[in-house]
Amino acid sequence: MLRNQEQILSKIANNDGHGENSAFFDGWKAYDSDPYHPTQNPNGVIQMGLAENQLSMDLVEEWVRNNPQASICTPEGASRFKDIAIYQDYHGLPEFRIAVARFMEKVRGNRVRFDPDRIVMSGGATGTQETLAFCLADPGDALLVPTPYYPGNDRDLTWRTGIELIPVVCDSSNDFKMTRDALETAYNKAQETNTKVKGLLLNNPSNPLGTVLDRETLSMAINFINDKNIHLICDEIYSATVFDEPGFISIAEILQESPDTNPELIHIVYSLSKDLGFPGFRVGILYSYNDAVVTCARKMSSFGLVSTQTQLLVASMLSDEEFMEKFLAESTARLCARRGTLRQGLAQMGVGILKGSAGLYCWMDLRRLLKAATFEAEMELWRVIVNDVRINVSPGASFHCSEPGWFRVCFANMDDETMRVALGRISKLVMQSNKNSESRKPCRRRSKLEISLSFRRLDEIMMSPHSPMTSPLVRART
Amino acid sequence: MTISKKAACNSHGQDSSYFLGWEEYEKNPFHESTNPNGIIQMGLAENQLSFDLLESWLAANPDAASFKRDGQSIFRELALFQDYHGLPIFKNALAQFMAEIRGNKVRFDPNNLVLTAGATSANETLIFCLADPGDAFLLPTPYYPGFDRDLKWRTGVEIVPIQCTSRNGFRITSPAVEEAYKLAQKRNLKVKGVLITNPSNPLGITLSRKELNLLLNFVEKKGIHLISDEIYSGTVFDSAEFVSIMELLPNRNNPQLMNRVHVVYSLSKDLGLPGFRVGSIYSNDRLVVAGATKMSSFGLISSQTQYLLSAILSDQVFAKKYVVENRMRLRNRHTVLVSGLRRVGISCLESNAGLFCWVDMRHLLSSDSLEAEMELWKKVVYDVGLNISPGSSCHCAEHGWFRVCFANMTEDTLDLAIRRIKSFVDSISPIKHCRNSRSKSISKWVSRLSFHDRECDR
């Protein structure tokens, strides 16, 4: 009976292209069924698998309270209710596009200009990625993507579009930097199978690495795509989470400096979900230097327009330049501090993270905790972390990492107290693992790790609260 | 080279006259004071008649408006809420509202609702779930021009028309359905289902029980799907006349059939909130719900909007009052347009729903052809200054029908539009004008003298 039922649905509906049948969802399920709460469920699973920016919500909340005119439903904003409610033009409110363009410029230190008429809306960056794939590639075509990469790319870019992703393999031997060799290898592999490569997708800052692409890599990438006459998609959704040197360089800047590059090949994916912490508002943006793509993507945006109620709120907030300056400075400072806490805490137990200056997560090196340098061992370790240590982190394999033993750990979706608890749990895991591996050969030591067996110091850090954040997080449940 | 076939082709349908009329309007939009000679937009099926009701609700309920619940700020919760299952309070309220519109003759389970960014997204998503590229769906004509984009463009699915004509008031018949199916087979297209719009756009009529049952018989026999786009369900002037496909299913006693009937809904027409992008899919098939829910990631409803609407719709007293008042205003406005047109000898398909009338201008065509229809349409847009939608853009099998919207303007503007039509009709047929200025009883007598006077047949 069930099989018959499945047959009357489409192939897409029946396949696994959405990616949710992967084993990694077990981590989410574990969290969903037993979520940590400091008082009500102190033994629950701590969510460190969700890249959300919750550290500066208080600033935004205060702004919303002080700016009732930004909502069409308050007395101050009500006069615009009707016009906003009926506005369904897929160009989007002009004030929205202008405010987004100006904000994107500000995040790039005003080193580039963005034309509001090239701003196209979509249903979150999820929608933007899919729309771009529909615009640039036909079923059977491919995009090159450096590994490790955001797992959602598989669903967003390939599920309904019928295209494929070809990995550009990066590894820890050079801190996961993308090389021209790796690009050429991936490109040639496609040629061998007669697969047409339509573009390269970069994620800058990188999820899951937490690093920014340097000028050299960006220039190399732009030369590569220009040579091959393929598109370059730059997902810059973490651009305002850069909290340290090296700073953020946008592909827009490189394009400006490369007059020989065909600008029609360059497209930027943006969103407010990470930089501002608004994933619920579904503000996805596509910025393309290609007129045909802008036109087509705009028509496709009908399938995922931003609610005009939200467009107005966002337009009001982003155009409050004074507030946005303050927000960006404070948000990046808080991210820097929180990451520092995590980095130091992990270093104390001899666990290293990839050096990085951006993102809401770090790329944690647990290779020496693996029973063997295999993905099976990584999965086994991951299950221990989820089920026994009670923390949901994301294993490198889910990001298509070529080396086992790396894990993405998010730090911006919790308060300081929860971070302390999480560090305590990780330290127990490491201690246990140290005991178990006493009989094993010592692992190659990485220069970045600060190996320390002084757990007393770790305890001191754990027991001295220093964060100004006191409000408990409210789970998004109604 | 560089862009995809989808980007390069025009399956988005944007080159159709439906959208071109909009473009002309954008260049020269009517405004009572600043541009009184501009083009009046009558090609946009929007419901602007009942905003005052929503505005006074908002004024009386400040908490919902300002991200507060019981005085506490829930901004943070909403900003972070991206669960594609949707806000439970919103789905509950929406399910209840949908039932209310159907006189509570149907119950909707919120767990079977999938939220999408507008019905545009809901329809596309359903097709992605039910059909593969190269498959087909049967649609009765005339149909909403946007379906060419929504159902076909990115999905690669085909539409095969079920031809309906004025001979029987554009009702769907069994022979027409069978013929469409055969046509699909001839074209080597696998038919995966039928999609109906009930109430119909552009006809403005509710489908009869007879039509709904023949369609159910058909999809039951063929083992295929039935999608019922019911986005105009709240615009039926007399609620007793609306029969939702969901009402008829229990009597069939066929659980498999039940799983193959899906409803699309939206708040863009009934509540007049197209900017907020609120659509939904309702299905009893858990696989469809599961698949569509995952796909909704590409077009979720803003949590801010979900929250606002859950507050409005959960106020059941208000929701009931709104539905009743809104219907009445639409009915009255409909009467203004229909009688105004009748006075100048133009008749409309008798309708009981929608934000538009299906207007018969066949007698104003220079010949029974597409060219003549386009010629007339251009005159109406450029000379008369009204953007109306030609039947050909709706894939109508007959020439000379136009969809004219009436709910997206003030009554004054509607009166002006009718006056403009009158001037136009007067200018092209002085003899007809003489006849039409007399009373109805006299015109019947006159019709015996003239074989061109088709108005009296209605």
Image (tube, coloured by chain):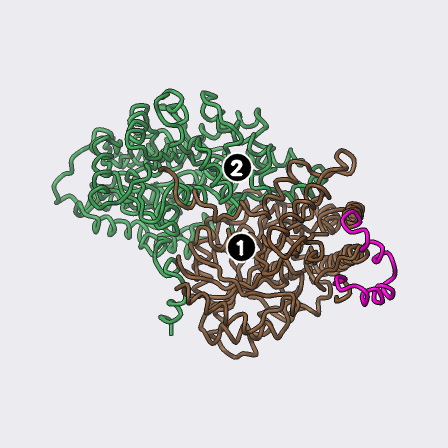
Chain colours: A green, B brown
Over which residues does the magenta segment extend?
A: B426-454
Q: Which residue is mark 1?
A: B147
Do discs 2 and 1 share a chain?
Answer: no
User: Residue A24 appears at what percent x and percent y?
Assistant: 32, 52
Q: CA distance from mark 2 to mark 1?
A: 41 Å
Q: Amino acid at mark 2?
A: Met
**Mark 2 or mark 1: which is in front?**
1
Circles 2 and 1: CB atoms closer than 8 Å: no
In the displayed structure, B248 sits above or below A107; it is: below
User: Residue A191 appears at what percent x and percent y?
Assistant: 22, 41
Specify whether residue A146 is painted magenta.
no
For this rendering, which residue is in front, B349 or A197?
B349
User: Residue A436 appears at what percent x and percent y?
Assistant: 18, 47
Instruction: Tell me, yes or no, if residue A8 can be seen here.
Output: yes
In the displayed structure, B32 sits above or below A11; it is: above
Residue in the image at 60% along x and 48% along y: B18
Q: Which residue is mark 2?
A: A57
In the displayed structure, B250 sits above or below B328; it is: below
Q: Quadrant of the C terminus of chain B?
A: bottom right
Q: Chain of mark 1?
A: B
The crowd level at tag 2 (other Cα within 10 Å; few <14, some 14-19, many 20+) is: some
Q: Is residue B436 left or right of residue B371?
A: right
User: Residue A466 appears at what percent x and percent y?
Assistant: 45, 32
